[in-house]
Image (cartoon, coloured by chain):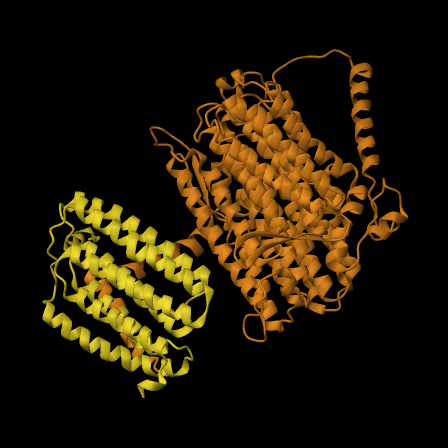
Amino acid sequence: MTNFLPIDFLLTAGCAWLVIGLLGLVAPRNTQLISKMLFPLGALVGVGVGLVALDALGGPAQTAVLAIGLPDLPFHLRLDNLSAVFALLLGFVAAGISIYAAGYFRKGEGTAPGLMCLQYHFFLASMLMVLLADDAYAFMVAWESMALSSFFLVTTDHKHEEIRRAGYLYLLIAHIGAIGILLCFGVMTGGMGGGGGDYSFAGMRAQDLSPFWASAAFLLALAGFGAKAGLVPLHVWLPEAHPAAPSPVSAMMSGVMLKTAIYGLLRVSFDLLHSTLWWWGVVALVIGLATALFGVLYSTVQNDMKRLLAYSSIENIGLITVGIGLTLVFHAYRMEGLAALAMTAVLYHGLAHAGFKSLLFLCTGSVLHATRERSLGKLGGLIHRMPWVAWLALAGVIASAGLPPLSGFVSEWLLLQSFLFSPGLPHPWLNMVVPVAAALVVLVAALAGFAMVKFYGIIFLGQMREPALKDAHDAGPWEKAGLAWLALITLLLGVLPSTVILRIDAATRQLLGTGLADKLNENGWWMLAPISAERASYEPLIVLVTIAAMLLLVRWLVRHLYHGRVRRTTAWDCGYHFEGPRAQDTAEGFSQPIRRIFEPMFRMERHFPTARDVKPYYSVKVEDHFWHWCYLPVARAAGWVSTLIVTLQGGRIAVYLMYSFITLLLLLLVARP
Amino acid sequence: MSASIPFSAQLINLFAAVILLLAFAMLAQRRLPQLINLFALQGGALCLATLVAAVTTGQVHLYYSAGLTLALKVLLLPWILHRLVRQLKVKGEVEALINIPTTMLVGIVLVMVAFNVALPISELSHTITRGTLGIALAVVMLAFLMMITRQKAITQVVGFLSMENGLFLAATSATYGMPMVVELGIALDVLVGVIILGVFFFQIRDQFDSLDIRHMEKLKDN
């Protein structure tokens, strides 16, 4: 046991997840056993994975060969710094979600809890395998297991028509993406002559691809992983699948699964391909910006709390892709220091988003359990009934809005810092275009803040819009623990950026050859100055202490210098206390300015009441342009082609066999040597 | 000329000829249980041919192939098919869409085509079994013809299995068999296929009170 390497531990952890999942099948209806024993055990394994990955960071890469799979095609596994960063993310976030799930799954809801437990832990294990895979075969097997297990998790409530539809859409796009990835690997093995055909990642690294084929591989990877990550225009599954799934599953998919796609994109574009072209970065930058802008605009106008978060995930994935694009541009021009800065922003935003978005999704789960309501228009004032959830959600909201001192601010700040250095690029067009991109990123950040204010304000603040909300109860102890764990991650990522960056710097160093560690070591752990302290620095602790001091000061001033009495009165009545909760700003009303300003970006169906209406009502439905531009034409074309094919389909088997027979004969006669 | 062909190759050619003859016999056979017996015999001949090739060349995996053929195509599948025929109470007669003498004539033409096509390929091959490639191709085509001209669903399955025999013979004759993995995979596919089709037979019979495939034309859309 002296050589029990981290990779062996991670493999054991994966197996442990599988075993926990299978144990769920022993007594599939025993909710007590499954939720109070198996899910917490899974959470423990998650913490273990996180700690081991943390320990493995900065160490040498470790490999292993598993003798499973097809004969002569063993699974190659490898744990390097890039996988370790994502395994760290997977482990710690999964721990929080598993603890929460221990309190979340109740009796008699959809799938039997035992089956749920199996699917959930299988999902975790397959994501771990994706991170460890070191050949195309193992990667695709793990990737597809991940897609399938998450498909079954999404369709937990398969009795509803729209959930089945969401699951189908998800599976369809997951497969389109998988085809892209498969083709990408095929290109990278160098199968077109020249002694290629080695399917392991080591073999792909050794291939020397021509610029044309390298670009083809990159674009295929961008499309394939983009489908999983939710990049425009392959994002349509995401706002359907995330609301359909149970909240811990949405949290897992949004927080962790989307990151595996980012992992894949990083793996292909920086590790497996080594001759970067500058325009790859521009493509990623443009697609990322489009995704971010699209995601944030749609998230501001959603009225379903989980859809709002799903669109916000699209936005965050867009920002990460923008960072990847910027890294590619810098890397192509050999400006490795700046590339390292952008790469750090990418990895950091991945970690931050995993923490705060899972936190927010879990909070919506608690709200959903307490109120059975997911439409923002019927919530409100829940901070009085659910103080724990409300305060923990506030951490997620602040991070998601990119405000100091929490995690979202650090990564967005790093991203903008790297934009500020783009004028150094030796390319006139890029010099002009990249600042525009920076401005758009700032717009996205501001709109994200707007969406988060809407999310938090409408759900937790103000008055209760429905009388039934008075019966809402706070989350149970397991749920609170899970939420608190994720909030802690968000806080630590926000307050200790230098410490975290020093750990994940190993991954940047592995991919780009240089990192930020030297710069950071010049200053103390409390100060983040990625380029130089004179140019820009951020001291999160000082911000935190200042905010806390201001709050205490204001409280003291209000209590002691002002009249000192606490008056209780209805909130938001503007001095006119006859207004009921119905007079509050609605979810639709809140986002009306955005709908007005960005009108061409939405496809809206509005109904306004007129003076003659017997039952006047107002409704607005916002739809996705992409659905009408990209997907429906494809569907119509497929339908048209099918009607042509129906004429061939006479229904007689003998005739069908005849078709193949004649084809065979003709081919044999034509293809004679 | 025949002196230059080694004894083992002559044996293999003999078995291959038997397989071709059995294929014709299957094309002409009207009764279902006998058809299945002929299929079992064909499998037996295939097994012997593979065994001779194995003894001559000393390739270990050919022994496995021969064993697999014996277990699957001579014993297991005919047994399953016989059971199906008994359980489904199919009448013994096989009805053909085209009458049998015409089918036989078409079959002879197909054999000529197959030999003509296979000739240049077998000249490229260096195995002792290369002469049988034309026969293998002919068996595939005859089996295909049987699938086209018969009406009962079970005869189509037998045709499908017989086609697999032909493919197997082709693989053995051209390259001493496929890699073991592929062979195992195909064997499993065939087995599972027959089991699934067996289930389908019951469904079809329940639906139409008959196994006549002409009824399935009704299943078409619009």
A111 to A225, vertically: above or below: above
A360 to B14, vertically: above or below: above
Horizontal and vertical percent position of residue A85? 70, 47
* Residue at point 31%, 65% (across, down): B46
* Residue at point 74%, 11% (across, down): A565
Q: Between A499 and B123, which is closer to the camera in this rendering?
A: B123
A424 to A626, vertically: above or below: below
* Residue at point 72%, 69% (across, down): A427
Check the picture and name the quadrant holding the C terminus of chain A: bottom left
Apparent side of residue B222 relative to residue A633 in the rendered image (left or right): left
Horizontal and vertical percent position of residue A185? 56, 62
What is the total number of numbered labels drawn onto the structure image? 0
Quarter occupied by residue A672: bottom left
The answer to whether residue B175 shows anywhere in this view is yes
From the image, state the color of chain B.
Answer: yellow
Q: Between A282 and A657, which is closer to the camera in this rendering?
A: A657
Quarter occupied by residue A560: top right
Quarter occupied by residue A540: top right
Chain identifier for the orange-coloured part of the image: A
Looking at the image, the residue that sits furthest to the top is A565
Horizontal and vertical percent position of residue A430? 69, 65
Looking at the image, the residue that sits furthest to the bottom is B1
The answer to whether residue A457 shows anywhere in this view is no
Check the picture and name the quadrant holding the N terminus of chain A: top right
Q: Between A168 and B130, which is closer to the camera in this rendering?
A: B130
